Image (spheres, rainbow, N blue to C red):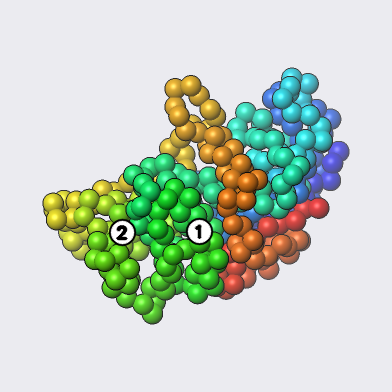
Amino acid sequence: MLENKKIVFEKPWEARLKTEPLDDSSVPSGHVILKKRYSIISTGTELACLSGNESWFKMPGVPGYSCVGEIVKTAPDVKDFSVGDTVFCYGNHALYEVMSTGGVFLHVSQDIDQKWIPFVRMASIAATALRASNIEWGDTVAVTGQGLVGNMALQLAKLQGATVIAIDVIDSRLAAARACGADLTINSVNMNVVEEIRRFTGDTMVSTLIEATGVSAVGVQSIDWVGQNGELIFLGSPRGVYETDITPFLNRTHLAAFNVTLKGAHEWRYPVNKTPFVKHSLERNSQLVMDHIFRKKLVLEPLLTELVSPSDCFDVYHNVRNNKDRYMGILFDWK
């Protein structure tokens, strides 16, 4: 038996670290037991789960998004992975986890600092917006929301040859965006976004706007920042109720003077594993992101704000909920 520790959302706004045994006497076919080193908090999704308002997340439940760890045991039929291998996967917040090797489950080079590996999923989510877009070299792209996913979308758009604008309400996140290559940053609380974009673009506005906040009001209002024949891409999952007159929004998509295209960019629009029939997959996107990290094409240092012990999980989630200005990238250190 292994002594396992895992973070459990027991009821709304209550997170606890629990200890319980994990039977390691046998491992299911196609699976391994993974001992975590780092797992990352996805603040938007996990706070939504912790609120009790996400129907797909049942309490009590173990949250988690992305992790890196070492294989400590394998099923006899697992051939591509061995005990001692370091891997990236979509794991939860637990010290040990029985994981299928059939999903997004990738070898990690020993030449990469492992604390950056959990960021792979955040960037691969952001890559969905780039895949869905028509962004080309020379375009101007704005990203609303400069959390981890929005920042990654900004960096990937810049790598694709675009001039990039970061929009947020938190100055510290805009400072991180500048450190990661933003050409213009706009605080929408104290700056006129339309006028700033108009000035910066010479009145053409942006060709692509990536909405990464998940705030419905932002998605509706930001369509005014998109130029003629541009596109508005919904990367963040919309949450909450927003009531407004939708006609002006629809006219921006309908009238020839605007002709803005709306696109969804949900992570799961692609198959999990590589297939000869579909060019893109979650597995391929993750591998490409990992290669970018290895080649230092992505700037990650400004995004890591906290490295914390799992035993502090109650305080961590409480602080993230009540002091969002301070937190961005938070890793649980399971070592």
At horizontal 13% and vertical 51% (from top left) the residue drawn is: 256
Q: Is residue 146 above or below residue 3?
A: below
- Name the residue tied to disc 2: 206
Residue 266 in the image: state x and y as whole percent.
43, 44
Residue 156 pos. (x, y %): 48, 50
Image location of residue 6, percent across then percent down: 73, 50
Mark yes or no: residue 278 visible. yes
How packed mark 2 is, by other alpha carbons closer than 10 Å (few <14, some 14-19, many 20 or more), is many
The single residue placed furthest to the left in the displayed view is 256
Please tell me which residue is depicted at 76% across the width and 49% down the height of the picture: 37
Instruction: Check disc 1 and report its element: helix, strand or loop.
Output: helix
State the residue position of label 1.
151
* Amino acid at dot 2: Val
Residue 286, by quadrant, is top right
Please identify the quadrant where the N terminus is shown. top right
| Crowding at mark 1 (Cα within 10 Å: few <14, some 14-19, many 20+) | many
CA separation in Å, label 2 and label 1? 17 Å
Q: Compared to 263, does 221 lie above or below?
A: below
Nearer to us in this view, 123 or 75: 123
**Amino acid type assigned to the residue bearing label 1 in the image:** Asn
Choose between 239 and 211: the one closer to the eye: 211
Relative horizontal placement of residue 9, taking residue 4 as reference (left or right): left
Question: As drawn, is 328 to the left or to the right of 125?
Answer: right
Outermost residue, right side: 1
Which residue does the image show at 49% across and 69% down from the upper left? Answer: 174
